[in-house]
Image: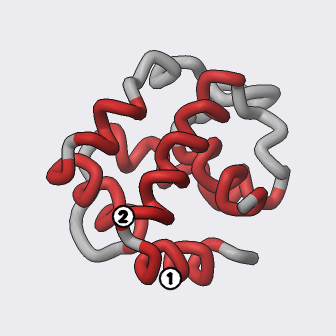
Amino acid sequence: MKFVLVVFVAAFAVVMAEESYGTQYDNVNGEAIVSDDKQFQSIVDCFMGADSCNELAAAFKKVLPEAIVQACAKCTSAQKHLARVFIEAYSKKMPQDYEKFKDLFDP
């Protein structure tokens, strides 16, 4: 679970400076995203490469590899909260897809 949390925390950030991820998406309402099945599925599909990414999902996906390697050292507390919300929903709503997600992003 810790690995996936790190992955998703990074997903809710955009690199704006070398020392930290930007705060551009820190006000994203994670609860609203996971409650909207269409939006939630769109983000999942983006991360898994099954569909094109909207601006938000693309920004999140862009930082995943670095954030995993660096154990989310550049993440804000807001990004950590977003990660928790998304990962909890992902693992409950789509457990098989969640396992594929972990396999894909586990270095």
Residue drawn at x 26%, y 41% is 35
Label tally: 2
Q: CA distance from mark 1 to mark 2?
A: 14 Å
From the viewer's perspective, tell me whether residue 9 is left or right of residue 12.
right
Residue 14 percent coordinates (x, y): 54, 34
Mark 1 vs mark 2, foreground winner is 2
Residue 47 percent coordinates (x, y): 41, 64
Residue 41 placement: quadrant: bottom left
Mark 1 lies on a secondary structure that is: helix
Residue 16 percent coordinates (x, y): 61, 26
Residue drawn at x 23%, y 69% is 51
Which sits in the foreground, 80 or 14? Answer: 80
Residue 43 placement: quadrant: bottom left
Q: How is the image coloured?
A: secondary structure
Q: Earlier in the sequence, mark 1 or mark 2?
A: 2
Q: Is residue 84 above or below residue 78?
A: below
Residue occupied by mark 1 = 100
Q: Is residue 33 above or below residue 86?
A: above
The crowding category of the residue bearing disc 2, from other C-alpha atoms within 10 Å (few below 14, some 14 to 19, many at least 20), is: few
Mark 2 lies on a secondary structure that is: helix
Q: Amino acid at mark 2?
A: Lys
- Tell me the tag on residue 79: none
From the viewer's perspective, tell me whether residue 14 is left or right of residue 34.
right
Q: Amino acid at mark 1?
A: Lys
Residue occupied by mark 2 = 93
Which sits in the foreground, 63 or 7? Answer: 7
